[in-house]
Amino acid sequence: MSLKAFHLIFVICTTLFCLFMGLWTGRQWLAGETGSQWQLLYAILSFAGTLLTPVYGYYFLKKLKGVSYL
């Protein structure tokens, strides 16, 4: 597996993890469970990661345009 293929899989998994984490902590914050200011912070940071990770992946794949996936 090449570095390009690994990064593509890594970016997809990381984006999905950040989305799940943001939804989970956001739901806990809305439910008003203990430590709500931390849960709000985690939700915001997770949604930021959900948006920024694909941007990183795009620029990485653009940089390695000539490299094969194999």
Image (tube, helix red, strand yellow):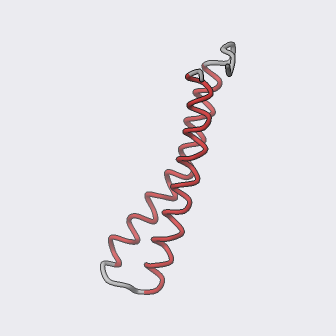
**Residue found 54% across the figure and 69% down from its top:** 23
Instruction: Identify the image quadrant of the C terminus.
Output: top right
Q: Position of residue 57 (x, y in %)?
A: 59, 35
Q: Residue furthest left?
A: 35
Query: Which corner quadrant of the image does residue 39 belong to?
Result: bottom left
Query: Which corner quadrant of the image does residue 55 belong to?
Result: top right
In the figure, is residue 52 to the left or right of 39?
right
Q: Residue furthest top?
A: 66
The correct choice, above or below, for 26 with respect to 46 in the image is: below
Q: How many marks?
A: 0
Q: Residue furthest front?
A: 1
**Residue found 60% across the figure and 38% down from its top:** 9
**Residue found 55% across the figure and 22% down from its top:** 3
Q: Position of residue 36 (x, y in %)?
A: 35, 78
In the figure, is residue 61 to the left or right of 26?
right
**Residue found 54% across the figure and 45% down from its top:** 52
The correct choice, above or below, for 44 with respect to 1 in the image is: below
Instruction: Identify the image quadrant of the N terminus.
Output: top right
